[in-house]
Amino acid sequence: MTRPPAHKWLSASRFRRRAFGWRSQPAVQRVREATAEIRKVAKKDPALAEAIRYAEASRGLNDHPIAIARACEEILLSSGPAEEAYARYALAANQRTTFLATFSAIAKKYPTKAPAKILDDLVASTPGQEGKWFAAAKDAGLYDEAIALAQRTPSDPRTLTRAARDFAATKPRFAVEAGLAALRWIAAGYGYEITGLDVLAACSSTLDAARNGGWVDEADGRIRALVAGPRSTAKDLIAASLGTRTNS
């Protein structure tokens, strides 16, 4: 069977290397035109190879890489090979404003892909930011993984405290570890404008969960260990909150 002649890409002539930044309106418009053309050609070409090849070749030509990845992902998903679409484009094509939203977008688009696999791939793609995937792991029901991530690199103390509060009754061990992680990162100086109320909430939620699980002495000892050593404002807040909570 004779293969139809290669498509002559109209949008190719509109891209000039470094002609404008990809955030500018001309760049955005060019990317929209290019992705629309890619989708149009893909519908006519069962092999899809030419459209994918062109999209890949567009990288670096004042493009928006996320838009190109989304176009390529859509082409592959529309033709059936979801595994290839995931492997090649899912992480880049589904970037959102938060780590949780990114995970949720991919999980929704690839329902047959195990959440743990998606999480592992996302974590691997952001070295040094493992703790920021805590909420995604928690929402996916991957509680052990969530705690492991929160212990590796900084995670938002308020997010960890909310988890400790919300799961104090139903998953006390998870809640205790989340609360201790919150206090650990507070003691280390992380968190935006942390106040005494934030510290008190973390201590309270941690000890409430510990009481539900029968681990109050353990939790108390681990909190005290966090504030041992050189003093700091954050450690003083934790020590004061612990004293208030223990004596109440």
Image: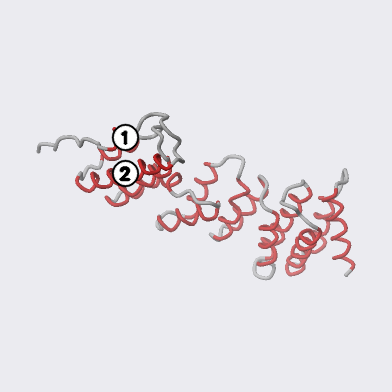
Cβ atoms at labels 2 and 1 below 8 Å apart: yes
In the drawing, does residue 207 fall left or right of residue 12?
right
The residue nearer to you, when weighing 211 against 86, is: 86
List the single residue furthest toward the left.
Answer: 1
**Quarter-wise, where is residue 217 in the image?**
bottom right
Give SS at disc 2.
helix
The residue nearer to you, when weighing 171 against 248, is: 248
In the drawing, does residue 73 fall left or right of residue 4?
right
**Quarter-wise, where is residue 201 in the image?**
bottom right
Indicate which disc residue 33 carries. 2
Q: Which numbered disc, 2 or 1, marks the residue that appears first in the sequence?
A: 1
Q: Where's the C terminus, which quadrant? A: bottom right
Residue 234, image x, y percentages: 82, 51
Indicate which disc residue 14 carries. 1
Residue 95, image x, y percentages: 48, 48
Mark 2–mark 1 distance (CA, rounded to whole Å): 10 Å
